[in-house]
Image (cartoon, rainbow, N blue to C red):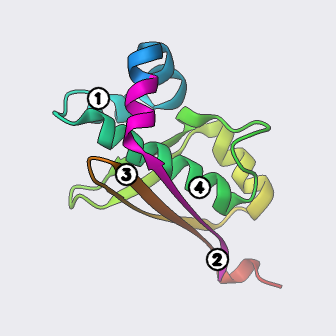
Amino acid sequence: MIFGIGIDTIEVGRIANSIATYGDQFVRRIFSEEETRYCAPRPHAAEHFAARFAAKEAFAKALGTGVRRGFIWKEVSVRKMFTGQPFIQLGETMRSRATGIIGANFRIKVSITHTKELAEAIVLIELDESQVQ
């Protein structure tokens, strides 16, 4: 059963400008160390950072909380499986928060895409059928 769906689109230029203006301060506040290690060395790093930013926003929408009130950006980390498929890994605080809202057994699905101008992500949170009343 679907708990929530979130989608987000962001202009790559907005992320590029934030990185240029605020530098490491912005990157450290928003992105996990793993995300930074993946994105920073890439030739078009802003596109990859923007796609992950969109995924974090989409996750917040799927969770139903938005990015205010206790949302910890870098605890929602977009990683890649060996196949290249993206997945979301939650840090301890965000996992606890999500569990409090959703329940213990849930799955997060994410799809991301980007061009030079736009990055987009969609997140689906599925409930374990045993949680449905």
Asked which secondary structure carries label 2, the reply is: loop
Residue 61 in percent (x, y) is at 66, 58
- What span is colored magenta in the figure? 1-18
Asked which secondary structure carries label 4, the reply is: helix
Mark sitting earlier along the chain (4/3):
4
Q: Mark number for residue 59? A: 4
Identified at 21% across, 36% down, the residue is: 44
Asked which secondary structure carries label 1, the reply is: helix
Of marks 2 and 3, the one in the foreground: 3
Instruction: Give above or below for 120 relative to 20.
Output: below
In whole angstroms, how far apart are the C-alphas of marks 1 and 3? 21 Å
Kind of residue indicated by mark 3: Leu
In whole angstroms, how far apart are the C-alphas of marks 1 and 4? 21 Å
Identified at 37% across, 35% down, the residue is: 35
Q: Mark number for residue 18? A: none
Instruction: Give above or below for 72 relative to 114.
Output: above
Mark sitting earlier along the chain (1/4):
1
Q: Is there a contact, CB below 8 Å, between mark 4 and mark 3? A: no
Q: Is there a contact, CB below 8 Å, between mark 1 and mark 3? A: no
Identified at 71% across, 49% down, the residue is: 66
Quarter-of-image position of residue 49: top left
Instruction: Mark 4: give few (<14), some (14-19) or many (20+) Cα within 10 Å.
Output: many
Q: Mark number for residue 118? A: 3
Residue 122 vs residue 2, the one in the foreground: 122
Instruction: Mark 3: give few (<14), some (14-19) or many (20+) Cα within 10 Å.
Output: some
Q: Is there a contact, CB below 8 Å, between mark 1 and mark 4? A: no
Residue 20 in percent (x, y) is at 38, 18
In whole angstroms, how far apart are the C-alphas of marks 4 and 3? 18 Å
Q: Mark number for residue 128? A: 2
Instruction: Classify residue 114 as left or right of residue 82.
Output: right
In whole angstroms, how far apart are the C-alphas of marks 2 and 1? 33 Å
Q: Mark number for residue 37? A: 1
